[in-house]
Amino acid sequence: MIDFQHILNTIVEEISSEPDKGIVATYIPELAKVDCTKFGISLLDNNAKLYSSGEANEMFSIQSISKVLSLSMAFRILGNDLWNRVGVEPSGDPFNHLSLLEMENGIPRNPLINAGAIVIADILVTQLKNPKQEFLEYIRKIANDNSINYDESVAKSEKETGFRNYAAAYLIKSFGNLKNDVEEVLDFYFHQCSLRMSCEQLVTIFYIFSNRGECLQNHRYLDLNQVKRINAIMLTSGFYDEAGEFAFEVGLPGKSGVGGGIVALLPNKFCVATWSPGLNKKGNSKLGMLALEKLTTTTALSIF
Ligand code: DON
């Protein structure tokens, strides 16, 4: 039997002595305030056993990790019609890149780059009566935890500086692939990105993707084919122009956020989350990636 607790403790110890912790995101001013020496890791196995080490209970801004959750909600509502509005190919470009969008007529390459997540936000704004409230309730229900909330100061901070997201949204709208008002869609998008969670809360939610669509309370959120497709998109597109590197080093489907979180999973085995706010040049957590590489190399547990 693998001693996950011992492995996580060892990872935290090794990570703490890494001299280069990366650089915190500054383009959203509120995120620049976070202490880059923080590190947490949690792993939830498919026997529902939770292991944690470091600052695994401290909440942080999940940012782009939320794109997987909004995708799952839109997929539940629209089914395969969703793929008329957004593609499933890796972009090989940074998360906020715009030129592909222009060349491909406003159909974003995939739902995990910003442009794709903005189209998903537009779908939810169309489909839900109170989009922000209903999305929050969906997340709280999966987590079985009503303490999860948006961070209004982070949402506001991003709204004030989110020029590239405005550019993407208007470009998509010019091609007719955004049905609602840009302000309303981006207000939803900035709020979903501002969700605050700890590593422990993240693994509890992403458990549905490692546990064939069912949460810890055995409620089904997604069918097996939907889980297969979302996990495939995480593998090919979860790390933008570093998706190849993440597959090569870690070998798991996963998703990063500029708040320094990463969540990854091995289907039917475990779900793992790390938090280290310092990012590498591609906008992914530097030490989070290193920690996950250590985990899958030590245990020889990966999809490959
Ligand atoms: O839209 C943005 O730029 C941010 N709210 C999210 C970007 C992000 O997390 C990219 N991930 N690594």
Image: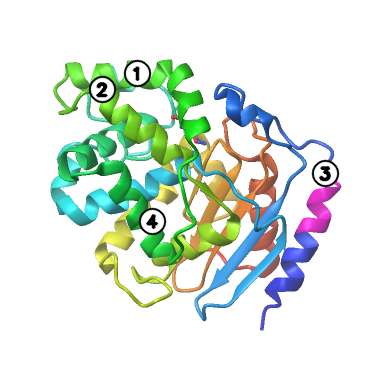
**CA gap, disc 2 and disc 4:** 24 Å
**CA gap, disc 1 and disc 3:** 37 Å
The answer to whether mark 1 and mark 2 are in CB contact below 8 A is yes
**CA gap, disc 1 and disc 4:** 26 Å
Q: For mark 3, does the 10 Å Cα neighbourhood hold few (<14), some (14 to 19), or many (20 or more) residues?
A: few
Determine if the C-beta at disc 4 is less than 8 A from ligand 1: no
Q: Residue furthest bottom?
A: 1
Between disc 2 and disc 3, the foreground one is 2
Between disc 1 and disc 3, the foreground one is 1
Q: Which mark is residue 182?
A: 2
The answer to whether mark 2 and mark 4 are in CB contact below 8 A is no
Q: Residue under label 3, please give it.
A: 18
- Of residues 148 and 21, the one nearer the viewer is 148
Within the magenta stretch, is there residue 100?
A: no
- Tag 4's secondary structure? helix
- Tag 2's secondary structure? helix
Residue appearing at x 28%, y 64% in the figure: 222
**CA gap, disc 1 and disc 2:** 8 Å
Q: Residue under label 1, please give it.
A: 166
Q: Residue 211 carries which label?
A: none
Q: What residue type is labelled 4?
A: Ile
Q: Which of pointers 2 and 3 lies earlier in the amino acid sequence?
A: 3
Residue 298 percent location from the top left of the image? 70, 65
Image position of 304 (left or right of 70): right
Q: Residue under label 4, please give it.
A: 139
Between disc 1 and disc 4, the foreground one is 4
Q: Which of pointers 3 and 4 lies earlier in the amino acid sequence?
A: 3
User: What range is drawn magenta here?
Assistant: 12-18
**CA gap, disc 3 and disc 4:** 34 Å
